[in-house]
Image (spheres, grey):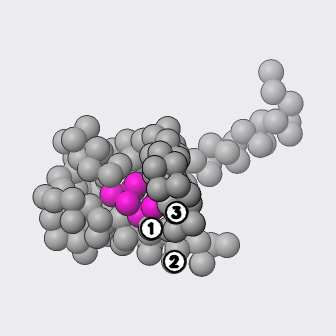
Amino acid sequence: MASGGEAHYLRGMVLHLIGSWVTLAFGLWVTSAIVPGFRLQGFRGALVVSAVLGVLHFFVGWLLFGFFTIATLGLAWVFAFVTWWFVTAILLSVTDSLSDSLRIDSFRSALIASAVLSLLSAVRTFFLH
């Protein structure tokens, strides 16, 4: 059985995870309203897509980032923002193939969506931190 401090810490982690999930879903929903060729099936679809994208980003995103860093002899690390932009676009395309709730017409749409999500994330970070 967890002590009071551990339970409080665990509850905080769960709330942070849920908050991040819903925030990403909202960002995806806004992105679908802005980016042509990037469509979601409502907010419920955004919740599904954000869960899939979050898991992919956690488990595969760092591997792709590391691969690009090694393949470019460290340049990907130097230009990390561009690398993460590209990695997120790849993961959005993979999420499109794994989920029926997302439809991306082209990789260009995925790149634009990735840029919009990055901008929304920066705005969220600015206002919440």
Q: Is residue 88 left or right of residue 66?
A: left
Task: Identify the residue under disc 2.
Answer: 123
Q: Is residue 22 above or below residue 29?
A: above
Examine the image and state in which quarter residue 33 appears: bottom left
Task: Identify the residue under disc 1.
Answer: 82
Distance from Cα at disc 1 to Cα at disc 3: 10 Å
Q: Residue at x 39, y 47 (%)?
A: 53
Q: Residue type at mark 3? A: Leu
Q: Residue at x 28, y 70 (%)?
A: 112
Distance from Cα at disc 2 to Cα at disc 3: 26 Å
Density class for disc 2 (Cα within 10 Å; few <14, some 14-19, many ≥20) is: few
Circle number at residue 27: none
Question: Which residues, given as a range, are shown in magenta?
Answer: 83-89
Predominant SS of the magenta segment: helix
Residue 76, percent from left and from top: 50, 60
Helix, strand or loop at mark 2: helix
Circle number at residue 75: 3
Q: Residue type at mark 1? A: Val
Helix, strand or loop at mark 3: helix
Q: Residue type at mark 2? A: Val
**Residue 45 in sight from this viewpoint:** no
Residue 87, percent from left and from top: 40, 54
* Disc nearer the start of the sequence (2/1): 1
Examine the image and state in which quarter residue 9 appears: top right
